[in-house]
Image (cartoon, helix red, strand yellow):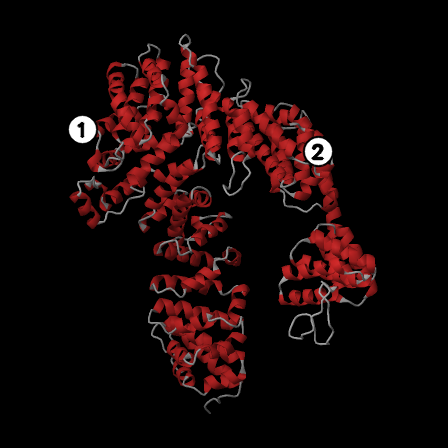
């Protein structure tokens, strides 16, 4: 530090010849100014910060703070901008720039009264400054409006609570007041008025009435109030209390349980960083949330084993744990919540898995509870980072199941086996190891031979779950097939018979779709499938048992003969679709599997003939395709599924509870949608039955493979449908991101092409959609595809750009120096492909109309520009010709020198020939533009009319 830099070539010396020392605040300030003018705001902030650290001159310090305030305004960090401007004002109270910058920052922070005071001082110092006077007028009007709104909102809030708490108010009036309160709470200003007007205690009064509609209104209002607001979320925890919220969620009312779960989620999101607002000095009022989060976690774990909690409440508690405990991003190193949950709650989750509803004194549960618990176990295990952590998880499970085995208590034994079934449906690896422990398989066999129905049901289900992987199935084939066959033949109980059949189905499908690896004799799988379809169509059998028929079909439809028989049986398909819409959502995975198999939308290994010959020569196994798995058979199956109403079933499945609808299930649904959208003729049916809307969540959440397939299905629909009909309302804006995700080199050409076609359709609708496409950073990708060798992709990209050039941001990109964007459009106009010419010429016509500078720039990008323009004006395709003539008209309007150059060329002759033609409706647009060009040339004095 302190050495001098004397060379003028280096940054230390300016034009004045002043020599700076390293660490000189003036040098840092000047560099900051340069960076600011160049638009590099981050570098400017860095320089100003360094200047502040080294500056001892009070007046200079004020100037630097003022400059840094301008940077923070650009970065939209308004709290910091106001702070810096205040420091500049402390140095010089009449620093007009600092005052106005603080006014701008305060306005953005919503502190209108403080902003008004600052601009008032600015107007006093410079009373003739129009900007200050306009800002003063505007802020004054806004403050008046805000005061008016505040007073009216306060009275409305009080009025709503009066109606809700009044015993004699009629029902319709109360419903309206409740809905108004919920809507008001979703707006920040409204939520704040409720909070300030004793709203918390009034909402607690509503909850204490115990009336479901009142409780629901209060809970939904609280959710709106705390969404994205850490301070209000903290207040809710302390005013209402976690225990009270848990007791509300525990009630046997699904709507209230779901609403309270949503409130917990809003509180949790706000406390863990979902709140992005800047509090400034008020930050100290927001307490540390770590303790609150731990308390919520422990309360939820207590809920899942509490007998006083309803099945719906237990489901929602498990859902909250499943959503918030495991890491969302595996790159995040902190998985302490998972370890905490395993230490304090793993045995509690296993207790839920082990419940046997048919026994007395069990926890209240819904049809979905145990599957949600299994999914939670799987997520927790998957979130562990090392072997010692996995060993600990396995040891806790092992100890729990071992302690439940009791030779003198059959109820405890079936609890242990059911807990094992829960593990086999969740972290299979753990369940598989525990199923191989000494005595476990023997216990299953003993339970299968029990006289009690419940023992047999639990044991058979455990056997089915244990044979989920082929390596395990080979063990069960040798040990369990005879046992299951024996049960199937001897039992007269339909519930046990169907489960035994599913076990046989599962084992029979262990070879997948490999025709040469059938486990059972020819025709056996078809017989099993026929029996499954028979049970599926029998309405006298309970839903829980019929569900197992679909489980059987999920495995048996690996066989192409079974697939074909199933789609021929329309009553069976309709029965399956109806069951998928029932409250029992544990069925979703089996339905999705069956549909994936029927549409052949699973991943297929490419069979290379040379490798097949090599495998045959070395006597290795070669997978064989079933004749009925060929394309034409698959296409027929798709048509039959669509006719039977598969789309309405799929849309209903997508709306299922988030925990039940796992990422794997979402991926399978996306695969099915893509297979159904393959034929363009079927896409109208998909749109008409709500398939377009259903695909959006699948494209935004789930596995990478699932999101890609859902996005591709969306692209297929968006490419040929009216987007307003396919994706009504605000949903249409959510389609943009999935389509843009297909624009990269990792996706195949068809995905690129259909995504570009879909974006072209969207970009044609309105400015808001065009801005959304640009915000999703699609422009560079679209520009890259305009260079693509593949003609159709290049054409689609150019058409998309043609619809986007009306945006000012796109026009600015074409006006920038140092790129070939405009040159590319001009050269594309000379291609032989008419559709490509039309798109490129259309883009040029709109660009030259919007930006006159581009007319001159166009003449500099290539020496061939005149020849290309003449070819466009003489084109056989009237649309291309019209675009060419519009470009000429724009150029005539842009610059007199350029107009002279055009009229001196053959363009005048072309315009004259076209303009002299008689009026003709089929080509009137072209004739009119040519005549307008000639009139413009006359106005400029470049040509004279014939006398």
Q: From what the image shows, is residue 303 above or below residue 673?
A: above
* Sequence-wise first label, 1 or 2: 2
Q: Is residue 590 left or right of residue 23?
A: left
In front of the other: 556 or 521: 521
* Residue to which mark 2 is pinned: 199
SS assignment at label 1 = loop
Residue farthest to the left?
617
Q: Which residue is under mark 1?
A: 521
Q: Which class describes the residues within 10 Å of circle 1: few (<14), some (14-19), or many (20+)?
A: few
**Residue 81: image location, x then y, percent:** 71, 55
- Give the x, y percent position of residue 824: 43, 71
Residue 334 vs 307, above or below: the answer is below
Q: Residue at x 17, y 30 (%)?
A: 522
What residue is rendered at 38% in x and 46% in y? Answer: 709
- Helix or strand or loop: what does disc 2 sit on? helix
**In the image, is 608 to the left or to the right of 915?**
left
- Asked if labels 2 and 1 touch by Cβ distance under 8 angstroms, the answer is no
Q: Residues within 10 Å of mark 2 (few under 14, many from 20)?
A: some
Say which of marks 1 and 2 sits in front. 1
Looking at this view, name the residue that lies furthest to the top. 408
Locate residue 501, reporting x and y percent: 28, 23
Regarding residue 356, the answer to whether it shows in the image is no
> What is the x, y in percent for residue 128?
79, 68
Residue 528 lies in quadrant: top left
Q: Is residue 573 left or right of residue 651?
A: left
Q: Quadrant of the N terminus?
A: bottom right
Between the C-alphas of marks 1 and 2, the distance is: 71 Å
């Amino acid at each position: 530090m302190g050495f001098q830099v004397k060379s003028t070539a280096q940054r230390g010396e300016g034009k004045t010849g002043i020599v700076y020392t390293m660490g000189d605040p003036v040098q840092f300030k000047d560099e900051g100014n340069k960076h600011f003018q160049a638009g590099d705001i981050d570098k400017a902030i860095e320089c100003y910060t360094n200047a502040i650290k080294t500056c001892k001159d009070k007046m200079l310090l004020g100037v630097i703070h003022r400059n840094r305030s301008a940077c923070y305004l650009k970065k939209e960090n308004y709290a910091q901008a106001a702070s810096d401007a205040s420091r500049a004002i402390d140095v010089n109270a009449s620093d007009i720039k600092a005052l106005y910058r603080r006014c701008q920052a305060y306005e953005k922070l919503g502190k209108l009264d403080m902003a008004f005071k600052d601009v008032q001082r600015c107007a006093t110092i410079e009373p003739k400054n129009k900007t200050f006077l306009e800002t003063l007028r505007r802020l004054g009007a806004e403050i008046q409006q805000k005061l008016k709104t505040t007073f009216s909102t306060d009275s409305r809030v009080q009025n709503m609570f009066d109606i809700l708490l009044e015993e004699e108010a009629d029902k319709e009036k109360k419903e309206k007041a409740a809905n108004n309160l919920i809507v008001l709470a979703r707006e920040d200003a409204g939520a704040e008025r409720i909070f300030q007007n004793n709203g918390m205690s009034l909402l607690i009064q509503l909850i204490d009435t115990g009336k479901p509609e009142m409780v629901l209104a209060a809970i939904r209002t609280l959710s709106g109030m705390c969404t994205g607001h850490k301070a209000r979320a903290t207040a809710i925890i302390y005013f209402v209390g976690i225990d009270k919220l848990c007791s509300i969620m525990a009630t046997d009312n699904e709507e209230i349980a779901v609403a309270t779960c949503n409130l917990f989620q809003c509180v949790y999101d706000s406390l863990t960083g979902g709140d992005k607002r800047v509090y400034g000095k008020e930050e100290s009022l927001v307490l540390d949330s770590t303790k609150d989060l731990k308390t919520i976690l422990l309360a939820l774990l207590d809920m899942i084993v509490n007998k006083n909690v309803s099945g719906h409440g237990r489901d929602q508690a498990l859902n909250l744990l499943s959503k918030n405990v495991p890491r969302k991003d595996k790159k995040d190193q902190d998985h302490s919540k998972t370890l905490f949950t395993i230490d304090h709650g793993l045995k509690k989750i296993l207790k839920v898995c082990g419940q046997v509803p048919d026994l007395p004194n069990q926890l209240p549960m819904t049809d979905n509870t145990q599957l949600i618990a299994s999914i939670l176990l799987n997520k927790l295990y998957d979130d562990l980072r090392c072997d010692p952590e996995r060993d600990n998880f396995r040891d806790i499970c092992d100890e729990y199941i071992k302690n439940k085995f009791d030779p003198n208590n059959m109820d405890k034994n079936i609890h242990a086996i059911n807990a094992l079934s829960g593990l086999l449906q969740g972290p299979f690896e753990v369940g598989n190891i525990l199923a191989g422990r000494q005595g476990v398989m023997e216990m299953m066999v003993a339970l299968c031979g029990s006289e009690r129905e419940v023992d047999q049901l639990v044991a058979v289900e455990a056997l089915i779950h244990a044979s989920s992987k082929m390596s395990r199935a080979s063990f069960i084939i040798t040990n369990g097939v005879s046992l299951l066959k024996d049960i199937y033949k001897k039992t007269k109980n339909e519930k046990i018979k169907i489960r035994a059949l599913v076990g046989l189905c599962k084992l029979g499908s262990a070879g997948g779709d490999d025709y040469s690896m059938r486990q059972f004799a020819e025709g056996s799988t078809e017989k099993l499938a026929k029996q499954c379809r028979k049970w599926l169509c029998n309405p006298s059998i309970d839903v829980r048992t019929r569900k197992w028929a679909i489980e059987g079909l999920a495995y048996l439809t690996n066989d192409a003969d079974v697939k074909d028989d199933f789609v021929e049986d329309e009553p069976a398909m309709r029965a399956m679709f109806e069951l998928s819409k029932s409250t029992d959502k544990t069925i979703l995975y089996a339905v999705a599997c069956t549909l994936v198999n029927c549409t052949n939308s699973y991943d297929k290994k490419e069979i290379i003939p040379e490798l097949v010959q090599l495998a045959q020569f070395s006597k290795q196994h070669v997978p064989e395709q079933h004749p009925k798995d060929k394309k034409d058979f698959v296409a027929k199956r798709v048509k039959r599924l669509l006719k039977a109403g598969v789309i309405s079933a799929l849309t209903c499945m997508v709306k299922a509870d988030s925990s039940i609808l796992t990422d794997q299930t979402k991926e399978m649904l996306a695969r099915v949608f893509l297979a159904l959208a393959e034929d363009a003729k079927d896409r109208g049916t998909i749109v008409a039955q709500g398939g377009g809307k259903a695909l959006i969540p699948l494209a935004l959440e789930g596995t990478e493979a699932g999101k890609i397939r859902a996005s591709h299905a969306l692209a297929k629909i968006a490419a040929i449908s009216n987007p307003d009909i396919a994706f009504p309302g605000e949903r249409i804006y959510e389609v943009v991101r999935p389509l843009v995700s297909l624009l990269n080199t990792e996706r195949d050409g068809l995905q690129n092409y259909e995504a570009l076609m879909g974006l072209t359709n969207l970009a044609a609708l309105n400015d808001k959609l065009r801005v959304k496409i640009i915000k999703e950073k699609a422009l560079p990708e679209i520009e890259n595809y305009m260079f693509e060798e593949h003609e159709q992709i290049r054409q689609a990209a150019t058409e998309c750009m043609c619809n986007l050039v009306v945006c000012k941001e796109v026009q600015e990109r074409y006006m920038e120096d140092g790129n070939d964007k405009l040159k590319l459009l001009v050269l594309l106009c000379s291609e032989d492909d008419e559709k490509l010419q039309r798109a490129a010429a259309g883009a040029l016509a709109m660009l030259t109309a919007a930006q006159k500078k581009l007319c001159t720039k166009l003449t500099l990008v290539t020496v061939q520009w005149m020849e290309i323009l003449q070819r466009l004006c003489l084109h056989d395709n009237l649309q291309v010709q019209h675009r060419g003539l519009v470009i000429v008209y724009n150029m005539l309007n842009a610059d007199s020198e350029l107009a002279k150059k055009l009229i001196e060329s053959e363009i005048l002759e072309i315009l004259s020939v076209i303009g002299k033609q008689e009026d003709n409706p089929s080509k009137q647009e072209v004739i009119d533009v040519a005549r307008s060009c000639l009139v413009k040339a006359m106005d400029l004095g470049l040509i004279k009319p014939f006398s």
